[in-house]
Image (cartoon, rainbow, N blue to C red):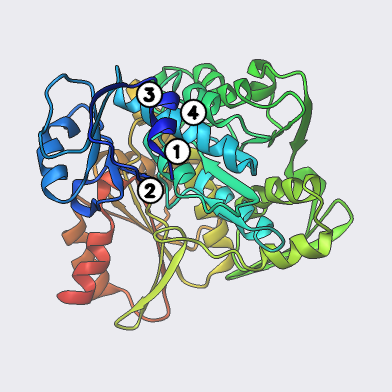
Amino acid sequence: MFNKEELIEITGAKVLKDSGLNLDFTVSTDTRTISPNDIYLPLKGETFDGEAFIDKAVENGAKAYFTSQSSINDKADLVLKVKDTKEAYLKLAQYYRKKINPTVVGITGSAGKTTTKEMVYAVLSAKYKTHKTFSNHNNEIGFCQTVLSMPEDTQMLIVEMGMRGLGEIELITKYLNPDYAIVTNCGSAHVGRLGSLDNIAIAKCEIAKGLDQNGTFISLNQDIIKKHLQFTGEKIFYAMNEVEIIEQKPSYSKFAYKNNIYELNVEGEYNIENSLSAINVGLKTGMSAKEIAEGLLNYHPIEKRWEVEEIKGLKFINDSYNANPESMKASVKAFTELYQNPVVILGDMAELGENELKYHHEVGKFLTKLNKNVKYIFIGKLAHEIGKPLESEGIDTKYFDNNKQASVYIVENLHKSNTIFLKASRTMKFEEILDYIKNEG
């Protein structure tokens, strides 16, 4: 909540109209849910302009709004002009973050950002009042929404940071000023946009530019991250060679790390790896190993991330929220090691640039080294490239152009003894497979 004077001072706004309204305002960017106590802040993007909806916001009840223009809606009580509405949003989030003053954890990485964020939340919320980024709303707008929706009694704030280009993480971390910065890993996701793994590492390491010098940088132990990290404070690098895996089975992992035993209600070495940053944050924030262990057991994957579902007698594991070469290798390895009669359905991986065929082919070569008693189904032109090395090894492979063709094959040829794993980039819309089998299969 902000009073009028705070709004003006924080954003440097010029008052175009003030009818003397004395309210504490909540910031809203959505005219559909606007209320009289909201001040409408119109955002602009490549395909939309929130300022075109100022009249709608006022019509729907807003008594105040920000604008970058000089025109005034006569029905509004308070009109504040700023140079850039997104910058104003960032400044308001920064002010509120400092006002509430929680301990802040920032998280980025090529793969595992959201999973790690959920694990850190599971750990910290076992002891502290904790607030986190919703779903994967991890751009600068999502950052503002996350911070400004933080309850006043928040002790721990967890912010996930995504990246589509250089400078984006630096922008968020500048306004967030985290106490702990986590980089889950540096991999080939978005290499099509940034051009090289070095540029990806540079972009991920931008998170340290806003990190408090008395804070801690936590990351997977990768040379490419160390090469580009510019931070002189405390650094913790973790690796799987520090872990003793005690037991793994479907939906369960047990392991030892730093002389303590931990459990997860998910399988896969990559999930254990993601949990190591959560453990380290817990230890740094004063939690006992017992409290951390209890928190990790509360972790459950969110939608389309290792989501188990049974449909008409067929068991599916849907991990199709997103995909890159590293996450595809890791998840298929975990799946094929732990399930009987496995069927793996893979689709295209997006944003891999001019070497996309090579990256897909390398995934296929990796998969040839795994359990060979697996049936593979490939959907899409690029996914076909994954299948070539497997096919040359005599491994069971099938190819389809679209989701419906694959769905028909699944219904007609698979049975309840199979467990079916789905992995692809969001552009492949693999949820269509499950919908088809539910509704028409």
Please identify the quadrant where the N terminus is shown. Answer: top left
Is there a contact, CB below 8 Å, between mark 3 and mark 2?
no
Marks 1 and 3, how far apart at CA: 12 Å
> What SS does tag 4 mark?
helix
Image location of residue 414, percent across then percent down: 32, 74
Please identify the quadrant where the C terminus is shown. Answer: bottom left
Image location of residue 216, percent across then percent down: 74, 32
- Of the residues under marks 3 and 2, which one precedes in the sequence? 3
Marks 3 and 4, how far apart at CA: 11 Å
To which residue does mark 1 refer? 143
Give the left or right position of residue 122, taking residue 70 as reference: right
Instruction: Give the mark toward the camera: 2 or 4.
Output: 4
Mark drawn on residue 227 = none
Give the left or right position of residue 80, taking residue 371 as reference: left
Give the left or right position of residue 166, taking residue 74 as reference: right
* Amino acid of disc 2: Glu
To which residue does mark 3 refer? 87
Is there a contact, CB below 8 Å, between mark 2 and mark 4?
no
Image location of residue 338, percent across then percent down: 58, 66
Pick the residue in front: 137 or 328: 137
* Amino acid of disc 3: Glu
Q: What is the crowding at mark 4: few (fewer than 14 residues within 10 Å), some, or many (at least 20)?
A: many
- Is residue 441 visible in the rendered image? The answer is no
* Amino acid of disc 1: Phe
Is there a contact, CB below 8 Å, between mark 1 and mark 4?
yes
Give the left or right position of residue 30, taking residue 353 as reference: left
- Of the residues under marks 1 and 3, which one precedes in the sequence? 3
To which residue does mark 2 refer? 391
Residue depicted at x 68% and y 50%: 278
- Of the residues under marks 2 and 1, which one precedes in the sequence? 1
Image quadrant of residue 225? top right
